[in-house]
Image: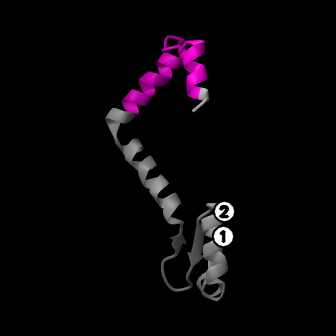
Amino acid sequence: MDSISVNQFREKLKHCVERVIHEHQPLKVTRRNGEDFVVISAEDWERERETLYVLQNQSLMQQIAESQSTHEAGKGYKPSDEELDEIVSI
């Protein structure tokens, strides 16, 4: 994660915001006498919130683990060629 001083952030606000939004990279803003903060795009924040929800949901994590085990053992559902064609053509 890139870092910038609060003074530089103030001077280059538009450029910094555009970069955060278009590059999907958060920006850490440091302050001399205070706590630092992070600037992140709304789209990236929503994605992070969804990820945190899944990681904190034990039931979902258990389903993911079981699915991974089934896949690794080669015991999962295997679609037919016709079904794969339909999925890929979407």
Residue 46 is left or right of residue 10, and the answer is left
The residue lying at 42 percent from left, 54 percent from top is: 49
Does the magenta-highlighted stretch encompass residue 82?
Answer: yes
Q: Quadrant of the N terminus?
A: bottom right
Residue 5 lies, with reference to residue 26, above or below; the image says: below
Q: Are the residues flagged by discs 1 and 2 in contact, CB closer than 8 Å?
A: yes
Q: Nearer the viewer, residue 31 or 68?
A: 68
* Magenta extent: 61-87
The residue lying at 60 percent from left, 75 percent from top is: 17
Residue 56 lies, with reference to residue 1, above or below; the image says: above
Q: Pointer 2: residues within 10 angstroms few (<14), some, or many (20+)?
A: few
The residues tagged by marks 1 and 2 sit, at their Cα atoms, a distance apart of 6 Å
**For the residue labelled by badge 2, is the local secondary structure a helix, a strand or a loop?**
helix
Give the x, y percent position of residue 36: 52, 75
**For the residue labelled by badge 1, is the local secondary structure a helix, a strand or a loop?**
helix
Residue at label 1? 19
Check disc 2 and give the amino acid type. Glu
Residue at label 2? 23
Q: Quadrant of residue 26?
A: bottom right
The number of discs equals: 2
User: Magenta span: helix, strand or loop, mainly?
Assistant: helix
Residue 22 lies, with reference to residue 69, above or below; the image says: below
Q: Quadrant of the C terminus?
A: top right
The residue lying at 61 percent from left, 28 percent from top is: 88
Check disc 1 and give the amino acid type. Arg
Q: Which coloring applies here?
A: one colour
Give the x, y percent position of residue 77: 48, 14
